[in-house]
Image (cartoon, grey):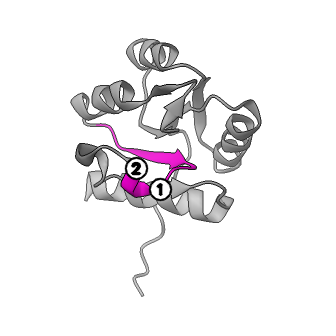
Amino acid sequence: MSSQKDPPLKGLRILVVEDQAPIALQLEDMLIESDCEVVGPASRVGQALRLLSEQPVDAAVLDLNIAGELVYPVADALDARGLPYIFSTGYSPSDLAAPYRRRRVLQKPFSRRVFIKAIRETLQQRSG
């Protein structure tokens, strides 16, 4: 096992796109406990795009279906900026449109440990 410590999350700005308030709050709590700064949460695709254009963001966690609208425009905006993201959804990974299936998908519900590990791995893939 490598002696290299997990990359620090302290100060990273994570955009949260989630339309269910209890889940958004849970994600926010998990990120804050890991010393991240939360951007949002955004409960609509348009709101998420606005936040992304107005505030610095290091990564994002995206629910697939936001108030009946698919989150792909936000994923595309993140891709255009070279920013990493994960999907957090109750849907199966196979339900994602083909261009997005290579992305990390966490199926709800998931633990804080699994969530933070996914964020770390996604950030490492970007920098590595």
Q: Disc 2 designates what residue?
A: 95
Find out whether residue 14 is within the magenta segment: no
| Three-letter residue code for mark 1 | Ser
Q: Which residues are magenta?
A: 83-95
Label 2 Cα neighbours within 10 Å, binned few <14 / some 14-19 / many ≥20? few
Q: Is residue 118 above or below residue 86?
A: below
Q: CA distance from mark 1 to mark 2?
A: 5 Å
Q: Would you say the residues marked 1 and 2 are in contact, meaning their CB atoms lie under 8 Å apart?
A: yes
At mark 1, the secondary structure is loop
Say the numbered circle drawn on residue 92.
1
| Figure quadrant of the C terminus | bottom left
Find out whether residue 94 is within the magenta segment: yes
| Figure quadrant of the N terminus | bottom left
Q: Quadrant of the rendered structure where residue 83 is?
A: top left
Q: Is residue 118 above or below residue 98?
A: below
Q: Position of residue 84 (x, y in %)?
A: 35, 43
What is the total number of numbered labels drawn onto the structure image? 2
